[in-house]
Image (spheres, grey):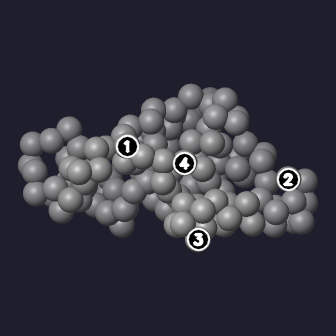
Amino acid sequence: DEPTYKLIYFNARGSAEHIRYIFAYIGIEYIDERIPLQLWPEYKDCKREESIFTFIVQLSAMPYKKLPVLEVDGKPVAQADAVARYLARKYDLMGRNESDALICDVLVDTLEDLEQGE
């Protein structure tokens, strides 16, 4: 059975965009839950008790209080590049050998640089 995925990130491209690219490339359905950026400080610091995002800000639901988070069958996983590598390995996108895998890692790091404006 295919796992269920929910990607939680801001209503922006940013650090989750390469994860979205991977989902688009492999054609796997996922929930793309986007949080309004202007509301993030309230949710991150748990200042609003009654919120549809309350589950996100709980430490057990949002590792490191950092986005993006990918829920895999309801289990949260943080760190965008680790998530991207997980999906790439799971769906056989890391190439045929170590040299191919190295090129994939270079591409992920290059995307990270572009996201950071370098």
Residue 101 sits in which quadrant? Answer: bottom right
Residue lying at 16% horizontally and 56% vertically, measured from the top left: 42
Residue density around tag 2, few if under 14, some if 14–19, many if 20 or more, within 10 Å: some
Q: Which residue is mark 2?
A: 95
* Spatial CA span between label 1 and label 3: 22 Å
Q: Looking at the picture, how far across and down is residue 59, in whole percent?
A: 28, 61
For label 4, the SS is: helix
Q: Looking at the picture, how far across and down is residue 102, in whole percent?
A: 81, 66
**25 sits left or right of 60 in the view:** right
**43 sits left or right of 83 in the view:** left
Residue density around tag 3, few if under 14, some if 14–19, many if 20 or more, within 10 Å: few
Residue lying at 70% horizontally and 36% vertically, measured from the top left: 25
The foreground one among 9 and 12 is 12
Q: Of the residues under marks 4 and 2, which one precedes in the sequence?
A: 4
Q: Which residue is mark 3?
A: 118
Q: Of the residues under marks 4 and 3, which one precedes in the sequence?
A: 4
Determine whether 10 is above or below 24 in the image: below
Q: Which amino acid type corresponds to the residue marked 4 in the rendered image?
A: Glu
Residue density around tag 4, few if under 14, some if 14–19, many if 20 or more, within 10 Å: some
Q: Of the residues under marks 1 and 3, which one precedes in the sequence?
A: 1
The quarter of the image holding the N terminus is top right
Q: Looking at the picture, how far across and down is residue 110, in whole percent?
A: 68, 64
* Spatial CA span between label 4 and label 2: 21 Å
Q: Which dot, 4 or 3, sits closer to the camera?
A: 3
Q: Which residue is mark 4?
A: 17
For label 3, the SS is: loop
